[in-house]
Image (cartoon, rainbow, N blue to C red):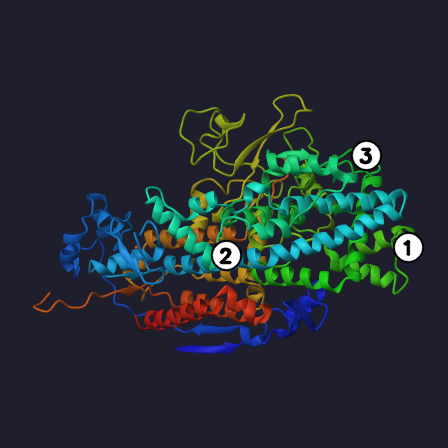
């Protein structure tokens, strides 16, 4: 039986939005002068929960199977030859997963969508087309549907970034820069220095965004883009000529157009040229931890390497680097009295990451930028558009931003606000922004923090003290990010599953080093030999200030299996235990605490954004299938298949959202005369299809709310999602009948 139920949690969603002050007005201009109602991200009608009630009653059969009892085995084996190993697994488990057989992998099929020939290796849809053409039954599994949703999600985000967000962030940066330059020339002392730093900060983003001459479309780049190797040169020229005639200035997807090259032009102001050049050099080298010339503390510049869909065009590459800059760099609130100007150390005994003087400058920077936002409605609307849409996709930031700082300014200065007044009231502003009950929950690597370690071996009290120290260091990263990276459930859980919170390694400590093969790959570092015969999560730290051997064996890495176990997969927990990845003194205690947190999430919580709802879909794959389900689904092998599906889909989710998700760091340390029609089969998992259908419809309606109709039509989102919803409804119905 299927029921549709509308959950009543508008008030909760609205409260969240008010708290985060995402959209401060009822009417907002989002694009092209179009005024639409955007009072909240998600309406009650956006979330129509597809509930399912099932009583599985499929007759069981015994394993291992006999091939003579498999209805279509003889016909199948004439077309696809199974290896002895694959046949053994088919008999043992009732199913087998094999690499794509050559009759399928090498078959060219015609795809109506693209009007082109393709092989399964070229296009995911081609697999099903090829299987159908050689009259093999199709088994529709959850993997394919999750992959389709990933393709949609990733493509939609990419279009939004390329066609909307790039221009918005450019305009925001240019306007803030103009204001900051004016403040630089009209003020003195600390205000002048804060304005100068803002000029440098914004110039870095604009320099990263602007197209270089080698990123601009040309005849050569068009040949590279449209003419495959070996093509007839004359045909190539005809093709390029046709493309240029039809698309004009937008003939290239990969490169900037000549018009964009002129439109997005920028020169770094002379006053900050040296600072900006040094910062850009570090970003372009992306070699790892270095001290930021502008922000003083250490930054992980390896994060600025474009990856995922951001490698598909020059515009997306530039957008990636600029948004990473705005998402990671923080204007810190508090500084340490123990540090000198220009000095940065993030350690447990410093009470700050930069000096008090530097923190004063950075806090002034943040309030100056927030003041500029408060004066410019267009900037607010452009910022709100990016933040609201990405919040619907991924979630909210756990860092402070323009809205939070702006609220503090509004409370203290109902009128008569100026840069000079900001400086005069610095102490009050600092105390007010510190009092905002909103602190970072995920350590994202700011300052390359190191825990102040007592000499090993550590007593229990000392281990507990390290946990408190890590929390204090996290609090010291509180500050302003212009477009802060987002808090996500998985990153938070990962940050809590590693040292110091998981304690010390308590597993079997074989002599080190050992020549036995490691459980999985290891880093190439000085302790790589020691990792052999240790679990994947294990690392060895050394306290150099202590007499040797001053080492600790701790949990340095989280695993995707940690997340799946916390989402309810008993199989994932079993694998963690058997591989030794739970053998740390405080792991089980911390796991139990986090499991309670996850289990306490309400149904409304799982529908706050698409990222969380995607994780809810994956939870449906972690259940243990009991009596009444198909016999093959009751095997451990099928549990492993479902676990791999969940891990793969979660990887795609992280891959799609890598620019916006705050990455967690560990602080240092499946005949008769008439041939019957080929029968297909749908993986009988109604709860999964119901949840994915809800996620798809929520996605569709959410975009309708957030994106003006003309922009939505350009993005071509609605038709694809509506068709996918129809397919999922059909699969839900079929799976319940099965």
Q: Position of residue 359 (x, y in %)?
A: 81, 43
Q: Earlier in the sequence, mark 3 or mark 1?
A: 3
| SS at circle 2 | helix
In the picture, which quadrant includes the C terminus? Answer: bottom left
Q: Position of residue 735 (x, y in %)?
A: 34, 69
Q: Give residue 31's quadrant in the image.
A: bottom right
Q: Earlier in the sequence, mark 2 or mark 1?
A: 2
Task: For the residues labelled 3 and 2, say whether their Cβ atoms are less than 8 Å apart.
Answer: no
Task: Give the residue drawn at x 43%, y 57%.
Answer: 622
Taking the image as shown, residue 425 lies to the left or right of residue 1, namely: right
- Residue ID for mark 1: 421
Disc on res. 339? 3
Disc on res. 372? none
State the separation of the CA atoms marked 3 and 1: 28 Å
- Depth order, front residue of 730/455: 730
State the separation of the CA atoms marked 3 and 2: 57 Å
Task: For the residues labelled 3 and 1, say whether their Cβ atoms are less than 8 Å apart.
Answer: no
Q: For marks 3 and 2, give the one nearer the viewer.
A: 2
- Depth order, front residue of 67/550: 67
Q: Residues within 10 Å of mark 2 (few under 14, many from 20)?
A: few
Q: Is residue 478 above or below residue 633?
A: above
| SS at circle 1 | helix
Task: Give the residue drawn at x 49%, y 30%.
Answer: 531
- Residue ID for mark 2: 248
Q: Position of residue 166 (x, y in %)?
A: 61, 54
């Amino acid at each position: 039986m299927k029921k549709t139920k509308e959950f009543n949690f508008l008030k909760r969603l609205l409260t969240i939005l008010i708290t985060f002050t995402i959209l401060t007005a009822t009417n907002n201009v989002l694009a092209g002068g179009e005024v639409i109602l955007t009072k909240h991200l998600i309406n009650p009608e956006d979330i129509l929960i597809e509930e399912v009630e099932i009583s599985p009653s499929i007759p069981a059969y015994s394993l291992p199977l006999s091939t003579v009892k498999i209805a279509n085995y003889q016909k199948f084996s004439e077309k696809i030859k199974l290896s002895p190993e694959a046949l053994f697994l088919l008999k043992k488990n009732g199913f087998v997963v094999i690499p794509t057989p050559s009759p399928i992998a090498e078959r060219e099929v015609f795809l109506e969508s693209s009007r082109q020939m393709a092989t399964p290796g070229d296009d995911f849809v081609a697999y099903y087309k090829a299987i159908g053409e050689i009259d093999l039954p199709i088994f529709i599994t959850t993997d394919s549907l999750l992959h389709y949703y990933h393709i949609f999600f990733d493509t939609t985000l990419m279009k939004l970034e390329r066609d909307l967000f790039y221009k918005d962030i450019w305009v925001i940066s240019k306007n803030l820069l103009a204001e900051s330059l004016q403040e630089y020339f009209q003020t003195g002392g600390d205000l002048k220095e804060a304005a100068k730093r803002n000029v440098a900060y914004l110039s870095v983003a604009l320099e990263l965004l602007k197209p270089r001459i080698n990123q601009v479309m040309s005849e050569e780049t068009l040949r590279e883009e449209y003419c495959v190797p070996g093509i007839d040169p004359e045909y190539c020229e005809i093709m390029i000529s046709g493309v240029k005639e039809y698309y004009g200035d937008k003939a290239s997807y990969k490169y900037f157009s000549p018009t964009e090259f002129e439109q997005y032009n920028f020169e770094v102001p002379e006053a900050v040229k040296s600072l900006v050049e040094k910062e850009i050099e570090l970003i372009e080298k992306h070699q790892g931890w270095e001290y930021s010339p502008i922000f003083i503390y250490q930054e992980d510049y390896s994060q600025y390497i474009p990856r995922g869909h951001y490698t598909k065009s020059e515009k997306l590459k530039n957008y990636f680097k600029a948004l990473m800059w705005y998402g990671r760099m923080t204007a810190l609130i508090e500084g340490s009295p123990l540090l000198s100007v220009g000095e940065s150390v993030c350690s447990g005994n410093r009470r700050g990451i930069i000096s008090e003087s530097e923190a004063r400058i950075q806090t002034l920077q943040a309030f100056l930028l927030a003041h500029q936002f408060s004066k410019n409605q267009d900037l607010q609307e452009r910022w709100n558009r990016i933040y609201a849409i990405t919040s619907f996709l991924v979630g909210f930031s756990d860092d402070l931003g323009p809205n939070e700082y702006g609220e503090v300014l509004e409370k203290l200065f109902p009128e008569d606000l100026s840069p000079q007044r900001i400086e005069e009231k610095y102490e009050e502003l600092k105390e007010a922004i510190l009092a905002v009950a909103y602190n970072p929950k995920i350590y994202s690597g700011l300052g390359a923090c190191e825990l102040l370690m007592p000499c090993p071996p550590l007593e229990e009290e000392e281990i507990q003290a390290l946990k408190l120290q890590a929390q204090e260091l996290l609090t010291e990263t509180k500050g302003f990010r212009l477009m802060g990276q987002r808090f996500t459930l998985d990153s938070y859980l990962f940050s809590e599953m590693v040292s110091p919170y998981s304690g010390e390694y308590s597993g079997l400590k074989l002599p080190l080093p050992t020549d036995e093969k490691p459980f999985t790959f290891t880093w190439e570092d000085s302790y790589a030999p020691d990792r052999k015969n240790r679990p994947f999560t294990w690392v060895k730290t050394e306290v150099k200030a202590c007499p040797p051997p001053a080492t600790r064996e701790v949990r340095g890495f989280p695993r995707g299996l940690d997340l799946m176990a916390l989402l309810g997969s008993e199989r994932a927990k079993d694998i963690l235990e058997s591989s030794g990845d739970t053998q740390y003194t405080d792991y089980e205690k911390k796991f139990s605490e986090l499991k309670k947190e996850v289990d306490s999430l309400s149904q409304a919580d799982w529908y706050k954004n698409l990222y969380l709802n995607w994780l809810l879909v994956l939870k449906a794959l972690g259940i243990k299938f009991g009596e009444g389900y198909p016999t093959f689904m009751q095997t451990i092998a099928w549990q492993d298949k479902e676990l791999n599906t969940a891990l793969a889909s979660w990887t795609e989710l992280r891959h799609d959202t890598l620019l916006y998700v705050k990455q967690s760091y560990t602080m240092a340390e499946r005949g008769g005369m008439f041939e019957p029609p080929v029968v297909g089969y749908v993986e009988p998992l109604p709860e999964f299809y119901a949840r994915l259908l809800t996620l798809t419809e929520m996605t569709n309606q959410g975009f309708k709310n957030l994106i003006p109709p003309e922009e939505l039509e350009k993005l071509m989102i609605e038709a694809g999602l509506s068709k996918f919803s129809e397919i999922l409804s059909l699969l839900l119905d079929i799976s319940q009948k099965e």
